[in-house]
Image (spheres, coloured by chain):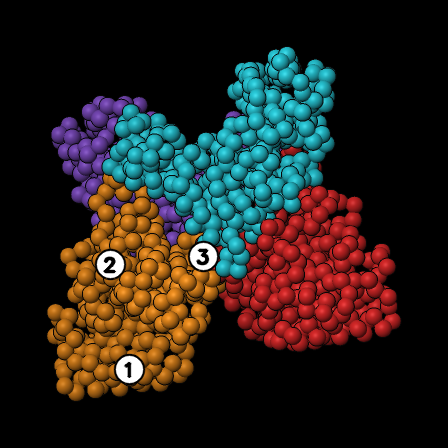
Chain colours: A orange, B purple, C red, D cyan
Amino acid sequence: MSTIGVDIGGTKIAAGVVAEDGTVVARTRRVTPATDPEAIEDAVADAVSELRADHDVTAVGVAAAGYIDASRSTVVFAPNLAWRQEPLREEVEKRVDLPVVVENDANAAAWGEFVHGGGRGTRDMLLLTVGTGLGGGLVLDGELVRGTGGMAAEVGHLRVVPDGHQCGCGRTGCFEQYGSGQALVRWARALAGTDPARAARLLELAGGDAAAVTGPHVTLAAEEGDEAALELVATLGRWLGEGAGSLAAVLDPGLVLVGGGVSSAGEMLLGPMRRAFAGALTAAQHRELARIEPAVLGNDAGMVGVAHLAARG
Amino acid sequence: MSTIGVDIGGTKIAAGVVAEDGTVVARTRRVTPATDPEAIEDAVADAVSELRADHDVTAVGVAAAGYIDASRSTVVFAPNLAWRQEPLREEVEKRVDLPVVVENDANAAAWGEFVHGGGRGTRDMLLLTVGTGLGGGLVLDGELVRGTGGMAAEVGHLRVVPDGHQCGCGRTGCFEQYGSGQALVRWARALAGTDPARAARLLELAGGDAAAVTGPHVTLAAEEGDEAALELVATLGRWLGEGAGSLAAVLDPGLVLVGGGVSSAGEMLLGPMRRAFAGALTAAQHRELARIEPAVLGNDAGMVGVAHLAARG
Amino acid sequence: MSTIGVDIGGTKIAAGVVAEDGTVVARTRRVTPATDPEAIEDAVADAVSELRADHDVTAVGVAAAGYIDASRSTVVFAPNLAWRQEPLREEVEKRVDLPVVVENDANAAAWGEFVHGGGRGTRDMLLLTVGTGLGGGLVLDGELVRGTGGMAAEVGHLRVVPDGHQCGCGRTGCFEQYGSGQALVRWARALAGTDPARAARLLELAGGDAAAVTGPHVTLAAEEGDEAALELVATLGRWLGEGAGSLAAVLDPGLVLVGGGVSSAGEMLLGPMRRAFAGALTAAQHRELARIEPAVLGNDAGMVGVAHLAARG
Amino acid sequence: MSTIGVDIGGTKIAAGVVAEDGTVVARTRRVTPATDPEAIEDAVADAVSELRADHDVTAVGVAAAGYIDASRSTVVFAPNLAWRQEPLREEVEKRVDLPVVVENDANAAAWGEFVHGGGRGTRDMLLLTVGTGLGGGLVLDGELVRGTGGMAAEVGHLRVVPDGHQCGCGRTGCFEQYGSGQALVRWARALAGTDPARAARLLELAGGDAAAVTGPHVTLAAEEGDEAALELVATLGRWLGEGAGSLAAVLDPGLVLVGGGVSSAGEMLLGPMRRAFAGALTAAQHRELARIEPAVLGNDAGMVGVAHLAARG
C-alpha cells in the first residue's frame, strides 16, 4: 500500500504519494504560510486531500525542519517556522483522519536514502545534507537515531573550531560554519575582496561585486575549471571530510552520503572530502574506510523517507 | 544462570562469575602475558577453569582493549597487546568449550553500566572513561553501538582542536589529548615548571620535580583545596563538558556517565563539566539537558558488561 | 612653539592647537565629508585657518584612519574614507602653507601617549586601542615603529585563531575579532539569544531584543555588577591579555597601554587581561612583566601625538 | 679594525676574527663545557687568546643562547647552559682585557645578516632561524630590537594555535611547535606510523622505524622528489608563512630572512611559505609584500653579527 509523504520547508510544502518501492507516483505543492501555524497545517491537509482524490493511502508522514520531540508528535521549536511546542501530529491527524507520523526533515531524508536511495544495503550510515546550512541524519544498526529528546544528528553543530566563526545557534565554531554553502559563500566573498585577480571569474559572474558572489557562482566557475573556485570547493570538501572523519571515530559508519544543493559539485567536492576523511580518521590504517558517496534522492529524500516511516507506523 | 566475564587489560586479566542481577559472585585474576597471544588465551582459559570449578556457567564474555571486528570474533588490532587479526573468540572457545562473546572493553563497560550500573532506566547513554587515556561506549535506543567495522565509540579521537596537541594515534587535537589523565598531568607539569609558586603544593607532592607530578598528585591536592590543582581539574572538566556537548548535538543522549580513574575527582570535575556541557550544546535552551553523572561499577564495568553480553548470546 | 594636530575620523575631524607640553589650548571640529577626498582636505584647511586666527603655530600634523605610505605623504588606502593613493600631505600643505606631517591615527595616538600620556618614561610601549575595532601603535627604543611600507602596528590583524571568525579584512581569526567592542557585542547577543535568563539585565537594557544589545549595555551592566556582563568583559580582557602576551614574546615592551572606548571598563577589563597576559607570555617567570595600564589621553591622543610629530618635523 | 666574535652554543663555542667588511679572517673552536659557568668563560677567553696571537683586535662580542638583560651584561637564563644571572660581560672582560659586548645569539645572527648578509640594503627585517627550534631576530628602522628586558624577538613563542601542541616553554600552541625542525619530525613520524605506504621512502631511510625518522631524512627524501616528504616540507613552509604573515601585520618588514638548518630545504620550503604569507597578511592587496629569502651567512651569522656589535661598542 502507498502512503503520503509531506515535506514542510521554509518556503514550500512538497507532498507526494509514495509506493512501497519508494516511487513517487503523484505529487503536489503548496506555498508555506511560514508565520501561521494553523495555516501550515491546513495547507498540509489540503495537499493530502488532493492526493487522496486519486490514490488509496494508509498513512501520512510529515517531515518538518525543526526539533521534533521524542514521541514524534510535537514540534518543539522550528527556526524558520512559527511553531513552538506545536502538536503537529494531532493537528494533522484531526484534519486528515489517517494515522500520521512526524519526523525531522533531515532524519526523514536520511531514512529515505537508507531504504530507497544511496544507503540501500548498508547498516550504519551518516547523511550530511550540505545546503545553505549543514544538516544530517544518522542510521545505526538499521535504525534511525533519534536520541532521548528526538534531537539527535544535529551534525552541523558539532564544534570543529574552538572559538571559531560565530554560529547562528549562539555557539562558535560549529561544523555548519565550515561545511556548508554559507561557508563557501563567505570564503568566496572574502577572496573576491582581497584577491580580485585570483577571483576574476567569480567577480565577473557576480557583476563585479564581491559581496554579490553566491554559491552557484562558485560551483559554476568550478565546473568551468576556474582554479580559485575549484580551490574553494576543495576547501569545503576538506572541512566536510575532516568533520566526517572526526564523527566516524565515534559512529564508525560504513557509508557517508552527501546530499543537499552543494553536493551537486560532485567529485570536485567529494574527492578532497575523501582524502581529508582518511587523514582525519583515527586508526584509518586498521580499518576499511567508510565509502563517501553522493545521495541519490535529491529533494525527494525527506518525502520518501517520511512516507516510509508512516508505512511502518 | 550465571556467566563469566573476563576483562583483559594491558597488565592484568580480571575474571568473575556474574549473576543475572549483575552481582559478581566469584573472582580471579591473572597477570597479562602481553607479548604472547597464545599465552593470553591460555591465561583466560585457566581463569575460566578456576571459576567453573565452583560455579555453573553457560557462557563466557571476553572484553579486550583493542579493535574487535564487526562479527565480534577477531581482535583486529590491540595497541598494548600482541594481537593482530587474532581469532580470539575461536581460540577461547576451543579452550573452554563454552559459547564465547568478544567485545571491546570500553563497549563492554558501557553495556555493564547500562544494564546494571548508572545507566539503568535510560535508553541513550554515552560513557566516557577518563583514565590515562579517554575511552568511551555508546548505547542508543537501548542497544550498544558497534558500527560497521566494530570500531564505534572511539570518542577519544574526535578532533576537538584543529592542529592541536599531537595524539599517539597519529592525528592531532584528539579529544583524548584534552580530556584525560595524561592531559591533566601535562598541564600540571607545565604549570609546575612555569609558575612554581602557584604549583607549590603539587611540587611538594612530587618531591620538588615538576616532571614528576602525577595525576594522583593533582587530585589529592585538589581534594585538599589547593587552588592550582582545583583549577587544573576544572580545566579537564571543561574540556570533557565541551567535548560531550559537541557529541550530544549528534547523539542526544539522556545521560553522560563519567568513569575511569580520574572520575574519582567527583564534583570538582563534574561541576565544571556540566556548566561547559550546557554552554557547548546547541539549542540547549530548547531541550532537557542530559544528566552528567559518575559511573558506578568502577573497574567491574567491563567484566559485568561482557558477562551480560555473553548471557544474551 | 605650538603646532596644530588634526585627527580625521570616519565621522568627524577634530583639530586643536597643542602646546609643547601637550596641552590642547584651542579646539575646533568639522563633520567629515567622507566620500569626497577634496572636501576632506578643504575641511582640514578650514579648521586649521580657524585655529590659526588666534594662535601662532609652526606646523600641522594630520592623523588619518588609513594606511599611510612610508614617506608619510600619501594615504594608500583608507577603509572608511574615499582616499585611494591620495597625496594628503601635498594637498594640505598647498592649502595651509605650513609644513605638514601625515600619520596613521593609531600610530599618532601611540606617539601622543608616549610623549605626553601614559607612556612617559618608558622606551618600549604597545598601545592597544579597543573600540569597535582593535587598533594599535608601537614605540620601540623611543621611536614610533612604522615599518617598511608604513603599515606596521596593525595588531588587530595578528591571527589569534586559525580558521577563526571571519574578519572584515578577508582573513579569519584576526585579533580584532576577539579583542574589540564588536567581539564583545557579538558574544553578548549570542548569550542573550541562547541564555536569556543569564542575560536578563542585558536584555532589559536592550528593550528585550537580543540583537539590540550594544557595547555600552554590556559595560553598564558590568558596572552594576551583573554577573553575565562581567564575564563577557572578562572574556574580552582575557583575549586582549593573551594576544598582548603573544606579541610581548616578540616585542618585549615595558608597557602595554589600553585605550579606546571599551577601555572605559577599567579594571573589570584590565584585571583579567593582566592575568591572561602573564599566563600567555613565554618565560614569564624569568622576566619582569610589562605593566598593563589604561591610556590617559582619551580621544585627544591622536591629535596630541600628530601635533608633536609635526613639531619634530 | 677587526673584532672577535664568539658564538656560544649548547655543544660548541665558535670564535672568529671578523674584519670590518664581515669577512671571517681566522677561526677557532672549543667544546662547550655546558654545565660549568666558569669553564665556559675560561674557554671563551682561551679561544680569544688563541686568535689574538696572530690578529690585532679592538673588542670582543659574545653571542649566547639565552636571555640577556637589557644592559647586555648578564645572562638571565639560558635553557641549555648552566648560567643563571651570570655576569658574562664582566667575567669575560676580566679574562680578556678588552671591551666586551654580549648579545643573544639569534639577535646577533639577525644583526649579522643585516649588516653583512641577506639583509643588506633593507631597513626593517625579520630573521626566522628554523633549526630544531624556531628562533628569530628583528631589525626595525635599522636598529636591532631588544625590548625593555632584552628579551624581544622570541618569535618562536608567538601563540599560533590556541590550546595547540604543548611547548617546552610551558605554554601551548607556540609558533615553534609548528614552524621548526622538531615539528617537521613530529609530523613525519606520525605519518610513518599511520600511513606507511605513503611514508615508504621515509621509513626506508629510517631503517623501517617510524620513531627513527629525522629531519634530514625528510629533506633528503624531499630533494629526491618523494611526494610525502615534499608535502611535509610544504606544510612547514605554510606554517612559517602564516606565522610570518601574522607578524608582518604588526612589524611590516621589507624582508623576511629564513635561516637555520631546515632552511637548506630551499624553495621546497620557501615557495609554500611565500604563498601562505600572502594569504595570511592583512591588506596584502594594498601593499608591496615583504620579500622572503634565504639567509646567507649560515652558521657564521651570530659570530659576524656580534663581532660587528662589538665594533660599534
Q: CA distance from mark 2 to mark 1?
A: 37 Å
Camera-side residue of C228 and A207: A207
Tell me which numbered mark, 2 or 3, is placed earlier along the sequence: 3
Tell me which numbered mark, 3 or 1, is placed earlier along the sequence: 1
* Numbered badge on residue A267: 2
* Three-letter amino acid code at the position of disc 1: Val
Q: Is residue A204 above or below residue D53?
A: below
SS at badge 3 = loop
Task: Name the residue that disc number 3 marks.
Answer: A173
Tell me which numbered mark, 2 or 1, is placed earlier along the sequence: 1
Q: Is residue A207 above or below residue C64?
A: below
The residue located at (30%, 27%) in the rendering is D205
The residue located at (60%, 69%) in the rendering is C83
SS at badge 2 = helix
* Numbered badge on residue A44: 1
D37 displayed left or right of A87:
right
**Where, by quadrant of the figure, is residue B249 drawn?**
bottom left
Q: Chain of mark 1?
A: A
Camera-side residue of B191 and D221: D221
Q: Closer to the camera: disc 2 or disc 1? A: 2
